[in-house]
Image (cartoon, rainbow, N blue to C red):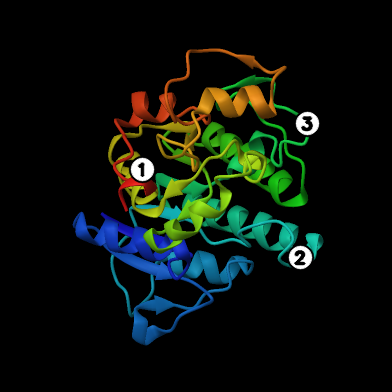
Amino acid sequence: MRIILTGGSGKLGRVVRRHLSDLGHDVLVLDRAGSVKDGVVPVDLTDAGQVLDVVAGLEEHPGRIEAIVHLAAIPAPGLIPDVATFQNNILSTHHVLQAARRAGVKRLVTASSETLLGLPMDVPPPYIPVDEDVTAPNSTYSLVKHLEEQMEIEFCRWDPELSVTAMRFSNVMAPEDYAGFDAWQDDPTARKWNLWGYIDARDAADAIGKALEVRGPGFERYIIANADTVMRTPSAELVQAVFPDVRVTKDIEGTETLLSIDKARRDLGWEPQHSWRNE
């Protein structure tokens, strides 16, 4: 497919760009960072006119856009003032959705966030493992992600042929990050803020590729996390030590993830292939 990738210069975006290209897709990267010589079209996604123009078709990049992967955003809370995070992220996502609708693009994958699960878990989750039914935004950043998901639901209602897949990515890691995992092993509370989760960028890219391939019309959200935690301590022991009063809904074996990825496995046929333990 001919695919627009927003945020293709970011940590995850670079891996996604390479993965989609390896799958044979023709990828057009939109990003305020990067330059034309790097194959990036500089676009301000908060400008609706720019977004519609590029989705409708650029003279220098002819061909109808068939899908959009929207990763561009202020990527975490606290990086800039809250109101700037809100304005940038909500407008960018709205303009991408609206441009897709106007241009007849029927397939989108968007970056949602694990922060919707109640991070930083100062209030214990209702149950463990946490799944997609939990939505508890506790910051401006996560509030915007919640509103983005709601917008996507409505856009799919307006257009029954539209497919939008929201990926609630866990903390994105690259192989070079794994050397730092040893620093957390003696303190189980150091990473309790996201239930000790992470996602290898290569597995995140694979989830995106599979969503583009298999998802039909309508909206769905998926937790995308690795199959294990960032800790060597067994997961059941972590829960007992840090969240002793939280209801556990299944037998937890070894160091398996406490962010449920069962839905992504079932619907997308996706299975994480990488672990920090093997790097």
Residue furthest to the front: 186
Q: Position of residue 262 (x, y in %)?
A: 42, 24
Measure the C-alpha gap from mark 1 to mark 3. 29 Å
Front one among 67 and 235: 235
Mark drawn on residue 84:
2
Residue drawn at 29 percent across, 71 percent down: 62
In the picture, measured across the screen, residue 123 lies left or right of residue 165, that is: right
Q: Position of residue 250 (x, y in %)?
A: 50, 13
Residue drawn at 79 percent across, 60 percent down: 82
Residue drawn at 72 percent across, 17 percent down: 245
Residue 66, relative to residue 17: is it above or below?
A: above
Task: Please indicate, yes or no, whether residue 151 appears anywhere in the rendered image.
Answer: no
Circle 1 Cα neighbour tier, 10 Å, few/some/many (<14 / 14–19 / ≥20): many
> Tag 2: residue type?
Ala
Residue furthest to the bottom: 37
> Which quarter of the image is occupied by the N terminus?
bottom left
> Sequence-wise, which precedes: disc 2 or disc 1?
2
- Residue under numbered circle 3: 123
> Tag 3: residue type?
Val
In the picture, measured across the screen, residue 101 lies left or right of residue 150, that is: left
Measure the C-alpha gap from mark 2 to mark 1. 29 Å
Task: Please indicate, yes or no, whether residue 83 appears anywhere in the rendered image.
Answer: yes
Q: Position of residue 97 (x, y in %)?
A: 54, 51
- Residue under numbered circle 1: 207
Q: Position of residue 48 (x, y in %)?
A: 61, 65
Front one among 152 and 130: 130
Front one among 180 and 48: 180
> Tag 1: residue type?
Ala
